[in-house]
Each structure stands twice: as C-alpha cells, then as structure tokens.
Image (tube, grey):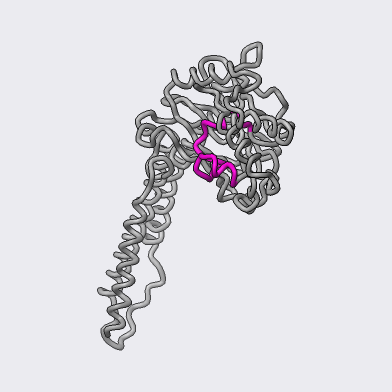
C-alpha cells in the first residue's frame, strides 16, 4: 500500500510539474506569447482546435461514464439486442462534420490571407518595390542565415532588422538543402527550398517587441544536418524611423571599415590574407548570391551572438575560430587551430570593431 501511495505521489508531482512548465515561455521565443498579426491568428487557430478537441474528449468521456453506470449488467438476463439507430448514426456523423467545418473555415481563410504578398509584387521601372514596403530576401545556408534588402542594396547575416507595426514581406530560399524559416513568437514557419522561392509576410507588434527588449529569436524548423538545432538567428524589431536610419547607415557604409589600434590593424591584415575570399565586410556587397559563400561580417561587432549560439565577446570569437567544427558540427567554416595566440587576439579585436552604426 505504501509503495502504491509513493508511486501516486511521484505521478502527481510530475503531472503538476508538466502543467507548470507548460505555461513557461519567453516573449522573444514562445508561440504562446504572440507578438504580431500572423502569430495572433495562428494562436487563435491553435486555441480553437484545442477547444474543439477538449470538448469532444469531455463529451465522449461523459457518455462513456453514463453508459458504464446506467447500463451496466445487473443480472444474467440478456438485454434486448438493438441493431442500430438511424437517429444516433445521423447525430454522430453530422456533429464531426460540423466541427471540421468550424475548424476548416478560419484555417483556409487565414492560409489565403498569409499568402497575400501582392504589395511586394508591384515594381517600378527600376525593379524596386513600389510604395513604402519592406521586402527581405532570406537565404538559408548550412548553418547560417543571410538577409538581403533588395530595394536598398543592403546585405546582412545572422541578425535580421525589421520595422514594427507594419507588414514585412519575405522571399525565402535555400542555398544547399531544405531549411525552414521560423520566428516562433511572430509567426511562420515556411520552407526555404533550393529550387524555388516561397513568399509570405510577418508583422511585428511594437508593444510586444518592447516586452522582448526588441529582440526575437529565429530558428531553422527543418532537420537539415548535425547542427540543425544550432541554426539560430536574431530579429531586431525597431520603429520605422529607426529602421530608416539603420538602412541609411548601412547604405552609407564605407568600402573599407575603419579600425583603431595596432592589434586590430594586425588582425585586419590577417583577415585580408585568410578570410576575405569568403567573407565580406561591407553591407553593400554587390556579389551575386552564388559567390556569397559565408556570412557577411559588416555588422559583426553589433551582433547579439557569435555564430548564432555563443555570447558575443572576444573569447567566444577565438573559440569559434579555433574549434568551429566542435561547436557547430558540419558547418563549412574551417577551424584555425594552428593560429598563434597573438594572431587570434588580433583577428578577434578586428572582428569586434566591424560596426556600421556609431
């Protein structure tokens, strides 16, 4: 008896913990804390489907209990055999159909709404999007993200910057294998395929962005290789005016970044010998997508994370340079384990000074 009680106590404890942990969620990551139009509608659909499922479970459970208690066998007599009831058959056929219709109508409606990218299709004679519309080309790579603002000639990596309180339109594609673009708190997800472009939009609520300290977490939602779980990016949601200023700063960036101090200048020399063939250090990189084989480092000193996973500091930059395959298996960045400490210090100092905004 004691053992049984102990088992039930453990079971009860785990059940309680499950319920408590199920309510945990950060505003920068949780789908249960929607931070935009798309996320809110997706949350509403989830709530509706859960309500319908719980309702069905409750009704079926009650009917089962009533049947067990009221019609349980009390003697050895064989009850009257009923072959069927047309009324009941109609009821339990019609009700599921009605429930499916209730769920299907908003689902189909929202699906077509989310696919409405007409504003981004309107181009002027120069091929730029008409009106004050923000368009971002997303390119997924093993295991990093590239973000291009085609109307402004600006390219960044790992950190996506967007304006709040308006729709931001995305063209998403993959450079190698299938990935999936997802910002859990704001909406998505959508596949990034190497052989076609998918289009959709998201909207970032300014009040919700403040709660998340203006940074949301993005992820790859498609198993793409050994470092799939480490393929993260950050979304900086800022006001429209701040976004315009950011674009102006990025467009006005100098062709050659200015670095201060002899150590950083030594690092620049090392970078130009070893890294410049793959990485760009200016946001107005004019190379075609096929030539952009590594993340653009123009804003490296302003990023939230190193390689999308490590705290942004010089020590972690050095760790990444010397042990990238251990930290993110399968990525295409070579490890420079033979680099001297002096060279590491210099290269890290240079990278941390790569900033566009003052």
333 in relation to 5, above or below: above
Q: Residue at x 61, y 34 (%)?
A: 146
Task: Residue 144 in the image: state x and y as whole percent.
Answer: 61, 40
Q: 353 or 3, which lies in front?
A: 353
- Is 25 located above or below residue 244 in the figure? below
Quarter of the picture holding the N terminus = bottom left
Look at the image and tell me whether residue 223 can be seen: no
Q: Nearer the viewer, residue 132 or 106?
A: 132
Looking at the picture, how far across and down is residue 69, in whole percent? 26, 74
Q: Position of residue 111 (x, y in %)?
A: 50, 37
Q: Assess whether residue 39 is covered by the magenta stretch.
A: no
Identified at 33% across, 78% down, the residue is 80
Residue 348 at what x, y percent from top left? 59, 37
What segment is highlighted magenta in the picture? 296-319
Residue 303 lies in the magenta stretch: yes
Q: Quadrant of residue 272?
A: top right
Q: Is there any visible trace of residue 267 in the rendered image?
A: yes
Is residue 269 found left or right of 37 in the rendered image?
right
Q: Is residue 128 left or right of residue 59?
A: right
């Amino acid at each position: 008896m004691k053992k049984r009680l102990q088992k039930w106590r453990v079971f009860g404890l785990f059940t309680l913990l499950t319920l408590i942990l199920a309510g945990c969620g950060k505003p920068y990551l949780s789908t249960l804390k929607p931070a935009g139009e798309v996320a809110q509608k997706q949350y509403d659909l989830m709530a509706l489907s859960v309500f319908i499922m719980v309702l069905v479970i409750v009704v079926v459970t009650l009917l089962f209990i009533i049947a067990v208690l009221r019609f349980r066998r009390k003697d050895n007599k064989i009850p009257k055999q009923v072959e069927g009831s047309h009324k009941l058959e109609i009821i339990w056929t019609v009700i599921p159909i009605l429930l499916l219709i209730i769920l299907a109508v908003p689902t189909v409606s929202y699906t077509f709404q989310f696919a409405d990218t007409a504003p981004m299709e309107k181009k002027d004679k120069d091929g730029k999007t008409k009106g004050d519309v923000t368009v971002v080309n997303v390119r997924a790579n093993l295991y990093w993200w590239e973000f291009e603002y085609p109307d402004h000639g600006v390219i960044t990596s790992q950190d996506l910057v967007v304006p709040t309180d308006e729709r931001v339109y995305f063209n998403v594609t993959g450079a190698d294998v299938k990935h999936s673009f997802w910002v859990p708190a704001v909406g998505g997800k959508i596949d990034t395929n190497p052989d076609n472009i998918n289009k959709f939009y998201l909207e970032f609520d300014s009040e919700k962005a403040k709660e998340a300290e203006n940074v949301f977490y993005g992820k790859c939602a498609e198993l793409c290789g050994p470092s799939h779980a480490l393929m993260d990016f950050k979304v900086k949601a800022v006001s429209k005016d701040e976004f315009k200023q950011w674009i102006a700063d990025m467009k006005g960036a100098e062709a050659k970044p200015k670095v201060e101090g002899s150590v950083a200048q030594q690092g620049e020399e090392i970078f130009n010998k070893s890294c410049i063939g793959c990485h760009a250090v200016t946001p107005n990189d004019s190379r075609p997508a096929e030539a952009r084989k590594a993340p653009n480092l123009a804003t490296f000193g302003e990023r939230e994370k190193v390689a999308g996973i490590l705290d942004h500091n010089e020590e972690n930059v050095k760790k990444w340079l010397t042990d990238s395959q251990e930290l993110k298996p399968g990525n295409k960045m070579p490890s420079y384990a033979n680099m001297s400490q002096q060279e590491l210090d210099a290269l890290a100092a240079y990278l941390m000074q790569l900033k566009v905004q003052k």
